[in-house]
Image (tube, rainbow, N blue to C red):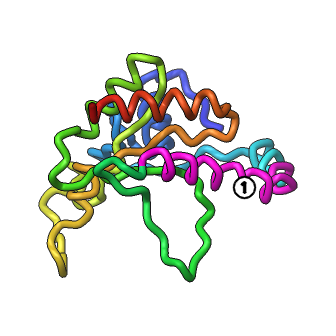
Amino acid sequence: MLLSNDEEAINKARFWATQSREPTPWYQHEEIGYNYRMSNIVAGIGRGQLLHLDEHRALKKSIYMYYKKEFADLSLTMNPYLPCSEPNFWLSCILLNKNCKVKPMEIINRLGEQNIESRPIWKPMHLQPVFKGYDFISVEGDVGRDIFVRGLCLPSDIKMTNQDLATICEIVKNLWE
């Protein structure tokens, strides 16, 4: 807890405690920030949620598989994983093919018109203004930048209904028509 009668100082501390995230639709950082937001109450809730881990993971997987099936004929790929692995399917993301005429912000904006939130994929650390001027080393080009430019995170909440998923898929697929 931080107490002060200096509102500017409190706002700055709150900004730092929320990772110094700038108000953009992607994660952008112009200052070093921290993730100091968990309380003991939140930790207790987390422990309670562990009882539902398998159920929630199964729901997340079904969302991913639904998107994968519905988007199979579009010029995009779902976030990949190795056959020898089993991800937690926390977030379903798509990567538009390089030759795709549809752009991520078109999808984000079209979904947003229906009050459906989606986001660009996280902006890579080497593109964050706070790290401007630092060396960036790459072996095979700037893969992170490419994924940021062509990718987006789809709605992945386990409370979505099949109708919600169908609506999202219809909106996205209509952009290809």
- Compared to residue 26, the image places residue 51 above or below, namely below
Residue 107, image x and y in percent? Answer: 33, 33
- Please identify the dominant SS of the magenta region: helix
Tell me the residue at 56%/27% (across/down): 4
Secondary element at tag 1: helix
Answer whether residue 39 is magenta in the image: no
* Residue type pointed to by label 1: Ala
Q: Quadrant of residue 133?
A: bottom left
Q: Relative to 163, is 72 on the left or the right? A: left
Residue 39, image x and y in percent? Answer: 72, 44
Viewer-closest of 69 and 154: 69
- Which residue position is annotated with label 1? 58
Viewer-closest of 107 and 13: 107
- Compared to residue 63, the image places residue 13 above or below, namely above
Quarter of the image with the N terminus is top right
Tell me the residue at 17%/66% (across/down): 134
Residue 30, image x and y in percent? Answer: 27, 45
Tell me the residue at 78%/57% (across/down): 53
Quarter of the image with the C terminus is top left
Answer whether residue 51 is magenta in the image: yes
Question: In this picture, which residue range is highlighted in magenta?
Answer: 48-71
* Crowd rating for badge 1 (residues with CA inside 10 Å; few <14, some 14–19, many 20+): some
- Compared to residue 167, the image places residue 156 above or below, namely below
Q: Relative to 84, is 80 on the left or the right? A: left
Tell me the residue at 34%/42% (across/down): 120
Q: Relative to 27, is 106 on the left or the right? A: left
